[in-house]
Amino acid sequence: MNHTQKEKLSDLVCQPVSWQCRLDRYTSLAIGGPAEALMRVDRREELQPVLAFLAEEEIPWRVIGRGTNLLVRDEGFAGVILVLGIDFKTVEKELSPAADIVVVRAGAGIALPQFALNCIDWGLAGLEFSCGIPGTLGGAVIMNAGAWGSDMASIVESVALLTAEGEERLSHRDLDFSYRFCNGLKPYQGKAVITEVVLALKKGDPNEIRQNCSVLQDRRKKTQLSRHPNAGSFFKNPPNDSAGRLIEASGMKGTTIGGAMISEHHANFLVNKGNATAADVLNLMKMVQTKVKNDSGVDLEPEVHFI
């Protein structure tokens, strides 16, 4: 970006823009080169002018949530990273025609664990599977996050999108969810930001819901605990099998390339031992894919997103 573009961009938001901002601080893998700019958008009314300016100037952009399912390349990102702030973290309940259902509207920037706890306090069931998934609500929709046999597709009614031209709303049918993917959002990549998610949750007993959530969290800690920075499950599970089982069967637990290692505790975790580069992780990913393909005939597909 030239000086004029930078000045105009800075004028569009109330928060200071971070220039040449290293993204390792914004990802759970603690890896990543600099973005040309990182902008925190706190106010709803700021977002559309930002998107319109970026479209007009043909400046690439991406939204990141809490960076928990993300690998940023070592060269960084030649464009603008957007982070959704205060106005995109609100939650409100609405009346529903069904007596046992409560409709909840939530900002896409809210942390998923916090949102799940809010719903538990209100006695709303359906989000227990998300307890312990550390991303944002918007990110969870994009990847159709799930665990323990449930996922976002089972509770999302619709999402609001904002583009340079204005707001659109996609229904559950439009979203066309599949395993760890939201097909309906694919045409909007690089064009729209999820700003709000509408969910249908069931009324329940807060104590029972909280207990269920605690049980699932304990199970997660026992199977997925890692003392090293990581992005959670790195590969999608193939049909009727487990990526972790396949990687372990190939004898790859503990395998390292540079500072990247396949976790000795959970084979589907690629971790940063402290000095890993994105190149280390990508090379280790390719090694895993090749070995599993040779040993089991299965093509492992990354669950992690890349910038």
Image (tube, rainbow, N blue to C red):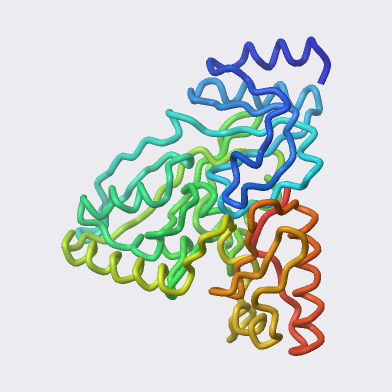
Q: How many labels does the image show?
A: 0
Left or right: residue 173 versus residue 127 is: right
> Could you tell me which residue is drawn at 37 percent across and 60 percent down?
131
Quadrant in which the N terminus is drawn: top right
Q: Quadrant of residue 130?
A: bottom left
Left or right: residue 271 versus residue 58 is: left
Q: Nearer the viewer, residue 259 or 207?
A: 259
Residue 127: image x %, image y %? 35, 60
Residue 231: image x %, image y %? 59, 57
Left or right: residue 244 versus residue 45 is: right
Residue 88: image x %, image y %? 45, 34
Q: Quadrant of residue 177?
A: bottom right
Q: Nearer the viewer, residue 158 or 283?
A: 283
Residue 240: image x %, image y %? 58, 86
58 relative to 304, above or below: above
> Could you tell me which residue is drawn at 55 percent across and 74 percent down?
266
Q: Quadrant of residue 97?
A: bottom left
298 relative to 9, above or below: below
Q: Which of 71 and 151 is in front in this view?
A: 71
> Could you tell me which residue is drawn at 54 percent across and 18 percent down?
15
> Could you tell me which residue is drawn at 58 percent across and 65 percent down?
180
Q: Nearer the viewer, residue 93 or 115?
A: 115
Left or right: residue 200 versus residue 71 is: left
244 relative to 151, above or below: below
